[in-house]
């Protein structure tokens, strides 16, 4: 009997950006560098958060990033390098189910990342 290998885990990451230009730059860079297969740019986000001693409310743009688990550290590091925030939000969650063909496409698009 042959052994069946487990597919590489796929994750979804979220990152907020201060404006559309930053979001576009990050999205294009992450896909071009094969750190992500796809990045959705969702404008119109309003964030309420504590920064230092103040409660802030800002308009932001959300990136929804599809990638593989093995690239999460590199993805976060690249975003931190390019992002204008002192502490950019980069949070990730494993995708536990989904369209097999889509998840395979994510794996294929990120497979040649070095």
Image: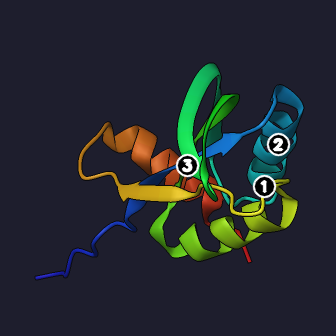
Residue that appears at 84% across and 51% down: 29
Q: In the picture provided, is 78 more to the left or to the right than 66?
A: right
Q: Which residue is mark 2?
A: 28
Tag 3 and tag 2, C-beta contact below 8 Å = no
Q: CA distance from mark 2 to mark 1?
A: 18 Å
Residue closest to the eye, 69 or 107: 69
Q: Is residue 114 above or below residue 52?
A: below
Residue 85's tag is: 1
Q: Quadrant of the C terminus?
A: bottom right
Q: Quadrant of the N terminus?
A: bottom left
Numbered disc 1: secondary structure: loop
How far from the left and from the top, in percent, is residue 49?
A: 54, 43
Q: Which mark, by number, is residue 63? A: none
Classify 10 Å Cα crowding around label 3: few (below 14), some (14-19), many (20 and above).
few
Q: Position of residue 45 (x, y in %)?
A: 59, 23
Q: CA distance from mark 3 to mark 2?
A: 29 Å
Q: Say what secondary structure mark 3 lies in.
A: strand
Number of other residues with Cα within 10 Å of mark 2, as a class: few under 14, some 14 to 19, many 20 or more: some
Q: Is residue 60 left or right of residue 22?
A: left
């Amino acid at each position: 009997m042959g052994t069946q290998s487990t597919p590489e885990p796929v994750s979804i990451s979220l990152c907020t950006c201060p404006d559309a230009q930053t979001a576009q730059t990050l999205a294009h860079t992450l896909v071009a560098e094969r750190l992500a297969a796809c990045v959705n740019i969702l404008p119109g986000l309003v964030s309420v958060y504590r920064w230092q001693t103040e409660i802030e409310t800002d308009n932001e743009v959300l990136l929804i990033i599809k990638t593989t688990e093995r690239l999460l550290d590199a993805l976060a590091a690249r975003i931190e390098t390019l992002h204008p925030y002192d502490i950019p939000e980069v949070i990730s969650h494993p995708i536990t189910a989904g369209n097999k063909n889509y998840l395979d496409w994510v794996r294929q698009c990120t497979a040649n990342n070095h």
